[in-house]
Image (cartoon, helix red, strand yellow):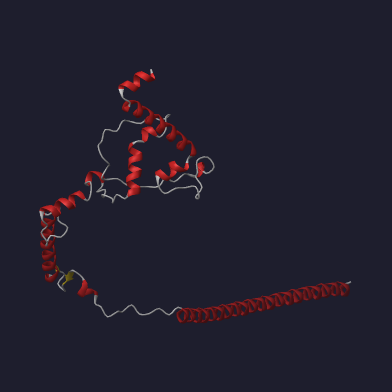
Amino acid sequence: MENSGECTKNNTTNVEHQVHNKAMNDVTVDYENDEDSSENEEELNLLLKKAKESLQANQSIINKNTNKEMRDKFSFPSLNVGISIDEQLYIRKHPSGIVTLRQDEIFHDNSSQKKQSNSNKTVSISDDDQDSSVKLSKKERQKLRESTIGPGWFDMKKPEITPEIKRDLQIIKLRNVLDPKRFYKKDNSKGLPKYFEIGTIKEGPTEFFSSRIPRKERKQTIADELLADQKSKSYFKRKFSEIQEQLKKKRQPKWEKGLTK
């Protein structure tokens, strides 16, 4: 009985030793695994650091090369033209901090003001003279005044009257006779106007088919337009014959008037 108890006791102790040894082996394996994992992490960190440094170095080299290429491609000239800005300025700043004006510029400004005042005086005195140095005679000044209608009509010039223009002005003056269906204001002026402007009527795009005159049918003067119109020509002939008959009756002697009655 005693031997059997000792055997069981020895067996239990052996089992305990085996379990303890196994646990110790597991702990050592875990410790070794932890050491291996920490070493791997350190190696990875070192590799990442080296890769980052190499990438930054390559990027800096690329930036330097691109900047150099840009400078070579866009070569700007120097802005130094040999003129000092300090000499061209009207204001000079001394080392003590005081700011003063250039004396030569002050003298130049005064002389320019005097010249301007003198020129204003000459212009205000000689309104009718084109050149202040040459004095015009009375007839020349009158001729110069009559060349334009005056500032009230924006200095409208006096045109040269040709036979064609004179004929057109006469037609405009007698415009009441042109059309029996149009009535104009009575013109009491004597003679032809001295100051006038001649223009051209331009039709708008809306009047292209309604009131536009083709280029071939356009005339240079009003008289040519009236002669080209057949209706106006027949009307003028009829009115002319009526006026001639009235004048003939007025010139007829009294004894002929009695016979006609």
Whole-percent x, y for residue 118 in the image: 10, 60
Choose between 91 and 237: the one closer to the eye.
237
Residue 38 visible, this orientation: yes
Residue 127 visible, this orientation: no
Residue 46's place in the image compared with 207, above or below, is: below
Choose between 172 and 118: the one closer to the eye.
172
Residue placed at 35% from the left, 48% from the top?
Answer: 164
Residue 120's place in the image compared with 109, above or below, is: above
Question: Where does the N terminus fall, quadrant-wise?
Answer: bottom right
Residue placed at 26% from the left, 33% from the top?
Answer: 188
The picture quadrant where one finds residue 48 is bottom right
Residue placed at 73% from the left, 75% from the top?
Answer: 26
Horizontally, residue 87 falls left or right of residue 125, namely right
Horizontally, residue 152 falls left or right of residue 101, namely right
Question: Where does the C terminus fall, quadrant-wise?
Answer: top left
Whole-percent x, y for residue 230 in the image: 49, 39
Residue 163's place in the image compared with 102, above or below, is: above
Whole-percent x, y for residue 104 in the image: 12, 71
Numbered-mark total: 0
Whole-percent x, y for residue 255 in the image: 32, 21
Residue 121's place in the image compared with 244, above or below, is: below
Choose between 239 and 79: the one closer to the eye.
239
The picture quadrant where one finds residue 11 is bottom right
